[in-house]
Amino acid sequence: MNLINTSNPDLARKLIRESKEKPVIVQSQNPEFDRKMLEYGKFNILLSPENSPERDRLKQLSSDFNHIMAKLATKNNVAIGIDIKSLTSVKDKKLKAIRLARIIQNIKVCRKAKTKIKLLNFKNRKNAFDFLISLGASTQQAKEAID
């Protein structure tokens, strides 16, 4: 597993090209960076696009992931990653609730665009499957996410 965590798209592309390990995981930074990376598309997983520091609008959550990005991810065979360890490490209950709501929104967008989801750092397959189902993933999405 190779995690690329930089906010420079050109450096990220260079690191992706030089990477020998599979899967290549790119940490989400901001909407512009994520869009450029999804258009480039030569990696496996875009990790945690719901980690936006941006405030939510009144009628919509600010997840920084939309249907256009989901279609790009599907076209370039990039999965959207959900990191359980980073989610459980959030101590503030309000922040955790906001992240879960954004994950639910991303799952719905991925479901419509047929984008794959990957769940990372889980311990028990059954619990991970049930967690995804409870967040609104289809059974097929949940099965693919934990494989």
Image: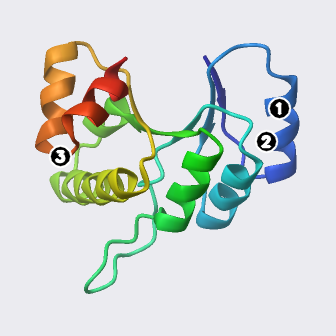
Q: Element at badge 2? A: helix
Disc number for residue 46: none
Quick one: 48 or 72, which is closer to the camera? 72
39 lies above or below 142: below
1 lies above or below 103: above
118 vs 99, left or right, is right
**Alpha carbon of mark 2 to alpha carbon of mark 1: how far?**
5 Å
122 vs 129, left or right, is right
> What residue did someone put label 3 on?
135
Percent x, y of residue 135: 17, 46
Q: Element at badge 3? A: loop
Q: Element at badge 1? A: helix
Marks 2/1 in contact by CB < 8 Å: the verdict is yes
> What residue did someone put label 2 on?
12
Determine the image quadrant of residue 11: top right
> What residue did someone put label 1 on?
15
Callout 3 amino acid: Leu
Callout 1 amino acid: Leu
